[in-house]
Image: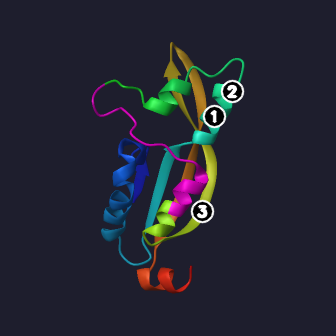
Amino acid sequence: MFAYQALQRVSNAAVHNTLKNWRHVLKPGGELHLFVPSLEWVAREILDEDPSVLTLVHIFGPQNDENTFWLSGYTMRRLRVDMEDVGFAVVTAKVGYYSMVIGGKDVEAEQHYVVGRKVDVKQVQEHP
């Protein structure tokens, strides 16, 4: 299953339930490929003297309509912990880039890419 730029559209309060629901539809050993904007990147950009024009979009979403407002954000650590909390074994965790055209210019920002494999919840609880 692929979730590209989707989890940040879910409120912080609903993240665990969303991940549990995604996990539920997977077969044992199935994988969730998750892509979310990097909060580490945006923190560096905010402190930069010349931040990227993508900074505000990265935090709040493009806001083109009611479905494109971000309700949550993720550091790599938080993303991994949340996935493990609901029964995913994190098998890949990388930082990559996505691009967007703003004002006629192609701009890039970091995103997190994490792959979680569905494991037996009993195994997760027995082996923290």
User: Which label sits on residue 43?
Assistant: 1
Q: Label for residue 47? A: 2
2 and 3 marks in contact (CB < 8 Å): no
Q: Residue furthest left?
A: 66
30 vs 1: above or below: below
* Quarter of the figure with the C terminus: bottom right
Q: How far from the left and from the top, in percent, is residue 81? A: 54, 62
Q: On the rendered structure, is 34 left or right of 71?
A: right
- How far, Cα to Cα, is label 2 from label 3? 29 Å
Q: Which residues are magenta?
A: 65-81
Q: Is residue 100 above or below residue 2?
A: above
User: Which residue in the structure is indicated by mark 3?
Assistant: 92
Q: Is residue 78 magenta?
A: yes
Residue 26 visible, this angle: yes
| Type of the residue with mark 2 | Leu
Q: CA distance from mark 1 to mark 3?
A: 23 Å
Q: Residues within 10 Å of mark 1 (few under 14, many from 20)?
A: few
* Relative horizontal placement of residue 42, taking residue 2 as reference (left or right): right
Kindly report which numbered mark, 2 or 3, lies closer to the viewer in this rendering.
Answer: 2
Mark 2 surroundings within 10 Å by alpha-carbon count, few (fewer than 14), some (14 through 19), many (20 or more): few
Answer whether labels 1 and 2 touch (C-beta < 8 Å).
yes
